[in-house]
Structure formats: C-alpha cells, structure tokens
Image (cartoon, rainbow, N blue to C red):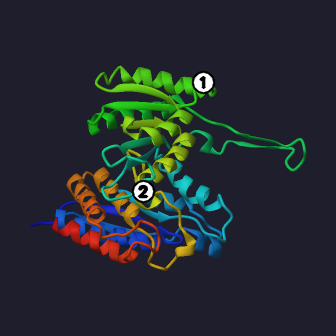
Amino acid sequence: MGKGKTYKVGVIPGDGVGPEIISAGMEVLKAAADRFNFQLDTVYYDFGGDRYLKTGETLPDSAIEEFKKLDVIYLGAIGHPDVKPGILEKGILLKIRFELDQYINLRPVKLYPGVWTPLKDKGPEHIDYVVVRENTEGAYCGIGGFFKKGTMDEIATQLDINTRKGVERCVRYAFELARKRNKNKTLTCVDKANVLTFSGDLWRRTCQEVQKEYADIKLDFAFVDATCMWMVKNPEWFDVIVTNNMFGDIITDLAAITQGGLGVAAGGNINPEGVSMFEPIHGSAPKYTGKNVICPIATIAAGAMMLDTLGETLAAETIEKAICKTLSEGYIKSLEAGKMGMGTAEVGALIAGFVSSI
C-alpha cells in the first residue's frame, strides 16, 4: 500500500517536562501514522526558557513565517523558573496565538472511564462537554498602561477588547461544533452581562443573530459565576460552552479538575483556515524535569485532537480508545506525578501499543 498524506508538524517540546511528554506523544502519533497510512514530517524548535536565557530571544518573527508553512504545531509546555513570569507566555504562547490568528481555544472536558473525579456521584456520562474560548481578543490583547506608576496616585488600565468580527467567528464555530457533536445540541453563552453590560450585550446579540442560521441548536445564556457553580453541581447540563478569553481561561481550569486533573486535560489553539497548535493545558512542572514521572495523557490526547483537525478522524478516535483502555483497565494507578505505577515513557509506549492493535 502506498503512503498516504504527509503532514508538516512543528514540534516545540519547550521547558521542564515538555520534552518528556512530547516524546511520549510523538511515539503514539507515529503508531497512529503507521497504522492509518499517513506520514508526519516533523520540524523541531527549541523555543523556551533555556534558549531565552542563552540568547535573550523568545520567538523571532522569522519563526512565525516558518510556522505559517506548517500544517500544525505540537507544543509541550512553556515556563521556566529562572525567567520572570509573563516573558515566555507573552513572547511565545500569545505571540503564536495572535500572529497565526488562532482565534479558537478548544477545550474538551471529558471524564475518562476509571478516572477519579472530586464531583460526588458523577461519572463519564455526566462530564462530557466542550468549552470554546475566544483566543485572540479580550483583556489578553495587552492594551493598557500605567499612569503615575509607583506612587499613591497610580492608575493601571487593561482594556477588554471585543470586536463583532472576533465574537461572531467564535460563536459561529461553537454553533457548528454543537451541530457536529450532535449530543444535546445546546450552546451556552457564558458572560457577565449583568455587570459587563457592553461586552455582554455584544456577545448576546451576536449569539441570537447567528442562531437564526442554526434553528436545530438550542441557545442558553449563563453568568460566569453561576456557570462555575453548575460545572460542579450539574456538569451534565452542558454540551458546548462559548465564552470570552478571560472567562474561558478561568473556567477551563475548574473544568480540568472535574475531569481528573491537568494530567488528562488537552487543548487546541485553532485557526480553522490556517495553522493550529495543540498542547496539554498543564504547565512545565520544573520540579519533575527529567524524572520520567509526569503523566503524558493530556499531551497524547492533544495529539488526537491534532489528528482530528487534520482530517485523520479514525486515527484520532483510535488514540481516544487507547487512552480509555489504558485508564479503564487499571494500567495506570494514579494520574499524579510519581504515582502512576509506570514512567512517562512507559505510558507512551503502552498507549502506542494499543493504538497499533485495538
């Protein structure tokens, strides 16, 4: 049989445990490629804390031009204890999102069988929804400043930017996803429209206007504080959530702990018309660097999301099945670092083996 499609993948292992989890993820992706007859042409990049400390460089513009020629980007983790907070995040992560216009942050919230959740009496059938977070606007644009900094009269401003174009394309993506999932066919717009009246009004009006094209999808509205409550009390109410950048950033961490923790939580920064980037949502965990103890499942699940976005849906579904088999049949004792019962590399090899055989 001839070789199928070839995808050009930019790989950024990053800092801390990033190289270890990316290595495990790549082993699984290669197993999927072999089984489903496609190829991954990988290009590795060393952007991260170590490079910044040596060169003072975060992410040069030339790298962005290279990224634009890729099909996707696979990211480990960014964050270094010797680099001041914000430098790498803004200089690498946010720069990639903004420059490649990755306007959707996609966060599946799925409790795998066999994974413990702190939510009493809730199981996999209750926790299965997706958060669509606007990813290139809001308070994260970096527009603002100081006046009389360092004095008692200091003023700090941070503007929350919401454009009709940015909101509508995010909302439209969320409606399409609710239709594709074909689960409860419900889209919940999460905001704080009772206080943040201008941005809230824009989001709500946009949702209502776009819904006219999606008569099969029910539209709900919820305030972000109430949403946090219901994510704990009644997660089964949700199907697809759409929200702004800041609220999405916060509620997805709460969502992650309900699905078993950051060790299984994967995310995608998506430009549906361009180059998307996939990653675990946890950080670089520097204290575990090189110890082969961190759980790579979030990274492996992010790889499955990546293949799905590339159109390799069967391969993505097979990785999901392999993850479910690994967790539901007790191969991993715990998702906590150092308590899995096997090492990071061994988990990668195990899941890769299942991908080849199930």
- Could you tell me which secondary element the residue under label 1 belongs to? loop
Q: Is the residue 17 above or below the residue 86 in the image?
A: below
Q: Is residue 334 visible?
A: yes
Total marks shown come to 2
Q: Residue furthest left?
A: 1
In front: 343, or 106? Answer: 343
Q: Quadrant of residue 210?
A: top left
Amino acid type indicated by mark 1: Asn
- Could you tell me which secondary element the residue under label 2 belongs to? loop
| Image position, residue 352 (x, y; %) | 26, 70
Q: Quadrant of residue 238?
A: top left
Q: For this view, does 344 lie left or right of residue 166?
A: left
Q: Is residue 173 visible?
A: no
Question: Dot 2 corresponds to which residue?
Answer: 260
In front: 122, or 316? Answer: 122
| Image position, residue 65 (x, y; %) | 47, 57
Q: Nearer the viewer, mark 2 or mark 1?
A: 2
Q: Residue furthest bottom?
A: 291
| Image position, residue 331 (x, y; %) | 30, 70
Q: For this view, does 54 lie left or right of residue 298?
A: right
Q: Residue furthest right?
A: 152
Q: For this view, does 154 lie left or right of residue 297?
A: right
Question: Dot 1 corresponds to which residue?
Answer: 194
* Residue under the image location 22 percent in, 68 percent down: 354
Q: CA distance from mark 2 to mark 1?
A: 32 Å
Quadrant where the C terminus is found in the figure? bottom left
In front: 318, or 294? Answer: 294
Amino acid type indicated by mark 2: Gly
In front: 355, or 22? Answer: 355
| Image position, residue 94 (x, y; %) | 56, 53
Q: Earlier in the sequence, mark 2 or mark 1?
A: 1
